Image: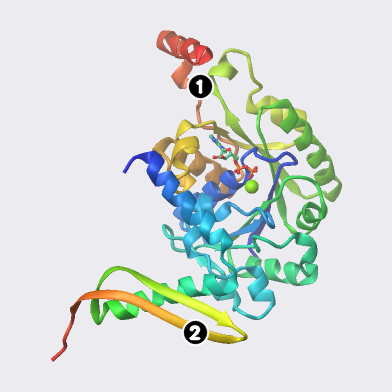
């Protein structure tokens, strides 16, 4: 990846983060924790998607991820 | 009680955040416990300079509202143990924050850390007045540019009234210009401002280019070394300056100077 592309990637991430409000920021931390937890059960394929929706004080949390391998402990 | 140092400048863009971040990393590299406080409400960038912007979850407003504990609010640095970052809210202004709570937090940090470095905003508004009153030492950051020196001088005269320990760091100094007699050097600037010289930070291309993808401290070995000298000066109350003119001395150096002047 060229330097310019790396700068662009970082900038995009920062600009997106600046648009987050409190809940979304928390969901980022939440997501990092979830990845840690899931990674001990599955081999995660790609990103984990955490969607938090708020409607009339009702929260719905949707978690999407793809696991390519499931670790079995026997 | 740790040393609580406020970095101020008057003029914006002179490199306060860059210098605060670099010195913070260097002090942590010297095994000191350091907390960096981003005091540029609404326009905070210190997290970027440290390269930890994605790790920031809570900020001071969360702490004040009871959503996070202080220990949780402090963001650990990704490179050095003992280095922490405290963020102010990226959308709120200084006016909307309870000052007695702010003072309490900074005092508390001073009890926990050996060094608390506060990166202030530009200007001499309410936040500036608040900070210079609660810190134990003040570092004025200036560049050799006359607008920066003029603003630094205004800041310095406010600082003198408080009779606190104060000094100046001259940033973005260029060896080719100083040797060519086209720019003030750090000693002249410190003398003009009537402040003790703490040190100098040359202008490095590595900072302009690589600070976009990593922490300023890690942009190059030269940069790291210059920050290390500044940190040691703060630690030991000395004023050593990195030699930024050596590249432009001698026959080859003169050629470099000419080439740079053309560019
Ligand atoms: N010594 C230096 N060499 C090269 N670029 C620098 C140096 N110091 C600061 N800069 C650049 O100058 C710009 C302004 O610095 P910043 O620290 O944000 O200033 P301030 O906090 O005083 O507004 C940044 O883009 C930074 O990368
Ligand atoms: Mg700044």
Q: Position of residue A42 (x, y in %)?
A: 24, 79
**In what element is the residue under mark 1?**
loop
Mark 2 within 8 Å of ligand 2, using the beta carbon? no
The way the protein has been coloured in the rendering is rainbow
**Residues at marks 1 and 2 touching, judged by CB atoms closer than 8 Å:** no
Label 1 and label 2: CA atoms lie apart by 61 Å
Lateral position of residue B210 relative to residue B6, left or right:
left
Q: Residues within 10 Å of mark 1 (few under 14, many from 20)?
A: some
Q: Which mark is residue A60?
A: 2
| Residue farthest along the right direction in this orientation | B161
Residue denoted by label 1: B245
Above or below: residue A66 compared with residue B249: below
> Where in the figure is residue B100, as x and y percent of width and height?
79, 70
Does any portion of residue B27 appear in the rendered image?
no
Chain ID for label 2? A
Q: From the viewer's side, name the closer residue of B9 and B213.
A: B213
Picture quarter with the N terminus of chain B: bottom right
Q: Nearer the viewer, residue B22 or B44?
A: B44
Farthest residue, direction bottom: A74
As drawn, B249 above or below A50:
above
- Looking at the image, which residue is at 45% across and 35% down? B206
Q: Which mark is residue A33?
A: none
The 10 Å Cα crowd at callout 2, few under 14, some 14 to 19, many 20 or more, is few
| Residue B183 in view | yes
Q: Position of residue A35 (x, y in %)?
A: 34, 75
Q: Nearer the viewer, mark 1 or mark 2?
A: 2
The answer to whether B189 is drawn above or below residue B221 in the figure is: above
- Same chain shared by disc 1 and disc 2: no
Looking at the picture, how far across and down is residue B127, in whole percent? 78, 55
């Amino acid at each position: 990846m060229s330097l310019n592309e790396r700068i662009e990637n970082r900038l995009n991430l920062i600009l997106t983060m600046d648009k987050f409000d409190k809940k979304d920021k928390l969901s980022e931390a939440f997501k990092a924790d979830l990845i840690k937890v899931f990674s001990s059960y599955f081999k995660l394929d790609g990103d984990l998607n955490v969607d938090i929706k708020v409607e009339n004080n009702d929260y719905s949390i949707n978690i999407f991820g793809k696991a390519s391998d499931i670790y079995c402990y026997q | 009680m740790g040393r609580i140092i406020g970095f101020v400048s008057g003029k914006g863009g002179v490199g306060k955040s860059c210098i605060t971040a670099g010195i913070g990393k260097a002090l942590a590299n010297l095994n000191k416990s350091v907390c960096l406080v981003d005091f540029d409400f609404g326009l905070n960038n210190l997290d970027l300079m440290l390269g930890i912007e994605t790790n920031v979850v809570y900020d001071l407003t969360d702490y004040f509202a009871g959503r996070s504990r202080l220990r949780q609010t402090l963001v650990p640095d990704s490179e050095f143990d003992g280095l922490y970052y405290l963020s102010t809210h990226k959308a709120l202004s200084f006016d909307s924050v309870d000052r007695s709570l702010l003072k309490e937090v900074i005092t508390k940090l001073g009890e926990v850390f050996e060094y608390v470095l506060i990166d202030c905003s530009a200007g001499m508004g309410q936040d500036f007045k608040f900070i210079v009153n609660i810190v134990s030492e003040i570092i004025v950051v200036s560049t050799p540019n006359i607008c920066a020196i003029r603003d630094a001088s205004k800041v310095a005269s406010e600082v003198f009234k408080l009779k606190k320990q104060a000094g100046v760091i001259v940033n973005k100094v260029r060896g080719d210009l100083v040797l060519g007699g086209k720019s003030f050097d750090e000693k002249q600037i410190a003398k003009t401002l009537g402040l003790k010289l703490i040190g100098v930070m040359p202008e490095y291309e590595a900072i302009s280019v690589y600070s976009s993808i990593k922490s300023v401290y890690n942009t190059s070995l030269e940069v790291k070394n210059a920050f290390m000298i500044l940190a040691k000066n703060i630690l030991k109350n000395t004023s050593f300056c990195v030699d930024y003119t050596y590249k432009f001395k001698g026959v080859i150096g003169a050629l470099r100077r000419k080439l740079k002047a053309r560019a």
